[in-house]
Amino acid sequence: MSRLDGESQIFDRKGGLWCKTIDIHASRVYNISYKLKHQHQIERTKDYACCLSFFIDTTMIILSNGFFTNMPNSEAVSQGGPANFAKLFSRHIVDTTDHRWIGIIFRASESKASRLRRILSFGRKDYFKLYFPKRTFKKITKAKKVEDSSIILSGVIGRVVSFIKKEKPDIVFLNGFGLFNWVLLKAAEKTNTPVVIQHAGIWTKELRLHKYLYSRAGLKMMEKMEKDSTRLSSAEVFLNTWSRDYYRRNVAQNSGNESVVIPLPFDFETFGKLSKTHKKSLITMPGAFKIGTIARWDNIKNHKAILALARAAGRLHLPWQFYAVTKIPEKHCLKNSYKKNIETIPALDRTGISDFCNSMDLLVLPSIFDVSPTVALEAVATGTPIAISNNVGYVNDFKRYGARKWVIDFRNTAKVLTSIKKIAQKPLPNSLREQIVAKHDHEKVFSAYLDLFYETVAKTKIKKR
């Protein structure tokens, strides 16, 4: 398996399986794992034969949660890490392997019962839409007392169980986590289908940051769901060691399943070339030091800190201009002030984002909690410096590879001003850029996921023997 040194290793394993290379097809080599004798008391040669027969004779059916923005006819821009990852990973699977990808898109509705129907099939991709009764959803989020979520959601879980029995996926891949993905998790448990979960964020942390949206009992029930993801999954994927360590301290300890670190994939070369024909064309304000951010509008992204910085720079008559790619809710109390101090830009496609990054002198990410924001990778790809908070998943890399000055405490606006003045016009250290590019190479990342899927399915087959 591909490894980098130290904390940068693309597979940071916590116990479990080790690798042996077996040639499956003439064009492809996969890593097979089987250090299972001490766990299952199965003769090693039988383990080998079982794994080998699976890899030679079987292609996988992968069932995952889907996203409407990834439909071929969708005009919306994919937003958020899980949606972008699903688009890239499913495309890689269809283009380079013989596996089949099934996506279930959950949609809250006014219907009284859950309904599931196929909405699109192309190539080896199939997408289904599961209509989820809103009133059932509210029985969780607005619960008056703590109850058994599996009973409340038994109808929709049962619908997914029937679907799994019909389609017979080899593995369920939970791309991120939330209430809908918990339904997939429980359905997989009932059908003995192995589960791999990617912890794209820490749901418990996000719930607590938005606790005003939920009842106290509902909050407890949903926090337990995330604990279930560790208890019931066969393997857990974390995007970096920072998020893994936070999860282990604050959500759930390892339950004996496979635990690995695989960074987000990113095609740096392609993204960096997107805006070369119109570099610096998006923003036109000669002489200004341009500071930008790309972030959805919510508490986690900490737009208040960006507004405070813009106001302070204005009071001091600094030659700084602020820009934000975001959408502010119409009735938000900060909307007028934010637009007065910061030029807002609606959602952009990949070329637009590349152009925006190229047009900035500095990108800022003052997030309260952000596991692996794509904007940091986009900044590296375009050679644009980026300043992050201590609560961003890349913080360990920044500190290890010479970029401590670009890690800023955004709680103190005066200190932020001082810190930005120190790093203005300075590039990120080459050592940091080289490490990030190596760790997030999309081909390495996708291969690491497929290796993990293979190993998980093979291990499940051995247990069933």
Image (cartoon, helix red, strand yellow):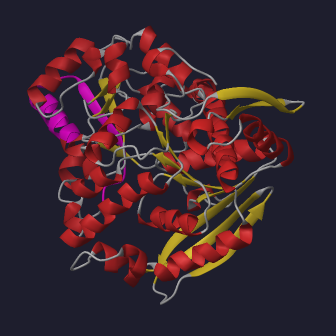
Residue 182 in sight: yes
Q: Is residue 139 left or right of residue 80?
A: left
* Quadrant of the image containing the N terminus: top right
Residue 406 picture location, percent across and down: 29, 19
Q: Residue furthest right?
A: 26
Confirm whether residue 361 shows in the render.
no
Q: Position of residue 110 (x, y in %)?
A: 45, 86
Residue at position x 25%, y 75% from top? 146
Q: Answer whether residue 325 is magenta in the image.
A: yes
Residue situated in front as seen by the camera: 126 or 276: 126
Q: Describe residue 270's horizontal placement relative to residue 301 as left or right.
A: right
Counting every numbered tag in the picture gives 0
Q: Residue 311, how many percent across, how many down?
A: 14, 36
The magenta segment: 305-329
Q: Is residue 190 above or below residue 110?
A: above
Q: Residue at x 59, y 49 (%)?
A: 86
Which residue is depicted at the point 19% across and 65% down? Answer: 212
